Image (cartoon, coloured by chain):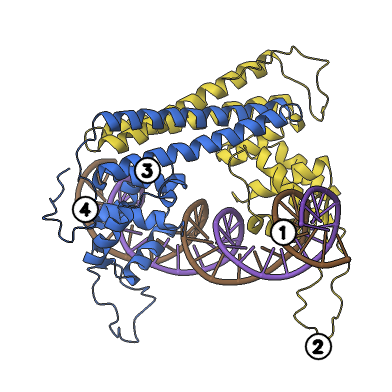
Chain colours: A yellow, B blue, C purple, D brown
DNA sequence: CCCCGATGTATCGTCCCGATACATCGACCG
DNA sequence: CGGTCGATGTATCGGGACGATACATCGGGG
């Protein structure tokens, strides 16, 4: 169930262009938030699953060939494989992208993928996902807060610091989401499938560094 | 290898007192940072591994008993099981707690466990772990920063926001670590002194009092 | 009396990850 | 010309983690 995240991200990237596994992995790292890169041990099985489900195709050369029994330690000819999304794949992606319920935002990683493909998402769905995510994170924050209050006396200084830092991070995430929501409400941004940059919408971009 | 984190945390908790799996799980959630609770699907296999390795014992009632064939769909008498750390377990924990190299801080989760049991850690080791962790996170931050600089033009607003938020979090983590380090340097806090690993006989091991 | 929620133990299928192996290619160097 | 080095590229394996699920006991309240 939660395993959808990788498939979702792959479909989203292949929607933009066919790719090799190798490049897919690099792009995945950007999309998944910069930290947290995906391993090949996850990627290739995921691609295999997508292929089995008919959501992607490959240009893989015919490999079912007999290959006589006397074959030496020939590990198997390995060629480059380009993955391309199918019509069903696009359908599935559109379906995933339009989900606005808890399944879209309760899992942070899945939310991240949704965010990464927000330009394929309708404006009202975007807003609902952002607000849902904020509620989820607020609930986490409250749980953390009361847990911290309960255990304040029992735990040592370092554990307390760890929890305090965690609480602070979650708190910041809530504020970050609030900013996104405000910005989204002010300017709903380009509608779906608008990969175009600039032109419309107030460029309230704040390009600052710290 | 990285799988040590759960075993480490369990040993640390059992060091304080024998416990049921159920309570272990609750305490684990606090120790592991509040967020991120551990599932039973991870906990029980981990306990089984620790038991097999002789690092913990159980008071489990004899279960190898014949149990006459007329036994109905009795799935097996399940009783409460109290886990207790063994001498080897304490030894292993002391070993883990005194590691100060990259294996102690490169993985954030493992670092978290180290932090949670810092009062069992020598002051100089504490400092080295904290500084090592800061270096690691600084490197992550720099990687993220340059990645963000490289992709600033290519990616859409939302992905950029996600990365900016991630960078901000990592940056805050560095500052948090710096505060911990400063505080640690000012007052090394309670805890055993510098490693007397060379000396064969640590005079006595003052039982901890929380 | 019965059900409910907390306490408690345990496994299964599926996924993910780190490590590892294998393979091709362009570039730079002696 | 040969060597090898780093980037590109495909693939698997063992083991651990997780969500779901089942089973089980017990205190208390309707």
Label 4 sits on a secondary structure element that is loop
Q: Chain of mark 2?
A: A
Residue B118's mark? none
Residue B129's mark? 3
Task: Decide: few, some or many residues near mark 2? Use Cα within 10 Å; few <14, some 14-19, many ≥20.
Answer: few
- Could you confirm whether marks 3 and 1 are on the same chain? no
Residue B91, placed above or below residue A207: below
Decide if residue A167 is on the left or right side of residue A63: left
Disc on the earlier residue, 4 or 3: 3
Q: Are marks 1 and 4 in contact (CB under 8 Å)?
A: no
Q: CA distance from mark 2 to mark 3?
A: 55 Å
Of discs 4 and 3, which sits in the foreground?
A: 4
Q: CA distance from mark 1 to mark 2?
A: 31 Å
Residue A129, placed above or below residue D15: above
Q: Chain of mark 3?
A: B
Q: Residue A32: x percent and y percent?
A: 64, 40
Q: Residue A24: x percent and y percent?
A: 74, 47
Q: Residue B158: x percent and y percent?
A: 68, 27
Label 1 sits on a secondary structure element that is helix
Decide if residue B27 is on the left or right side of residue A89: left
- Could you confirm whether marks 4 and 3 are on the same chain? yes
Query: In the rendered image, which quarter is residue B4 located in?
Result: bottom left
Q: In percent of the image, x 66 and y 30: which residue is there?
A: B148
Q: Residue A17: x percent and y percent?
A: 84, 43
Residue that numbered label 1 is attached to: A49
Residue that numbered label 4 is attached to: B196
Query: In the rendered image, which quarter is residue A195 located in?
Result: top right
Residue that numbered label 2 is attached to: A70
Label 3 sits on a secondary structure element that is helix
Task: Decide: few, some or many residues near mark 3? Use Cα within 10 Å; few <14, some 14-19, many ≥20.
Answer: many
Q: In percent of the image, x 51 and y 32: which residue is there?
A: B170
Residue B149, placed above or below residue C15: above
């Amino acid at each position: 169930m939660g395993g959808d995240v990788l498939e979702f991200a792959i479909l989203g990237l292949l929607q933009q262009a066919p790719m090799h596994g190798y490049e897919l992995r690099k792009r995945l790292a950007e999309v998944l938030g910069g930290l947290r890169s995906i391993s090949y041990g996850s990627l290739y099985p995921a691609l295999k699953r997508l292929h089995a489900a008919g959501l992607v195709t490959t240009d893989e050369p015919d490999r079912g060939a007999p290959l006589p029994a006397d074959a030496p330690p020939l590990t198997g000819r390995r060629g480059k494989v380009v993955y391309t999304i199918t019509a069903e794949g696009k359908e599935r992606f559109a379906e995933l992208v339009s989900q606005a319920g808890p399944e879209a935002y309760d899992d942070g990683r899945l939310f991240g993928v949704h965010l990464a493909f927000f330009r394929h998402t309708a404006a009202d769905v975007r807003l609902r996902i952002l607000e849902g995510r904020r509620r989820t994170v607020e609930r986490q924050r409250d749980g953390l807060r009361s847990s911290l209050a309960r255990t304040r006396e029992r735990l040592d200084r370092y554990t307390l610091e760890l929890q305090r830092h965690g609480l602070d991070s979650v708190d910041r995430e809530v504020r970050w989401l609030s900013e996104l929501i405000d910005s989204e409400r002010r300017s709903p941004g380009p509608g779906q499938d608008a990969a175009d940059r600039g032109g419309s919408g107030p460029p309230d971009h704040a390009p600052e560094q710290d």
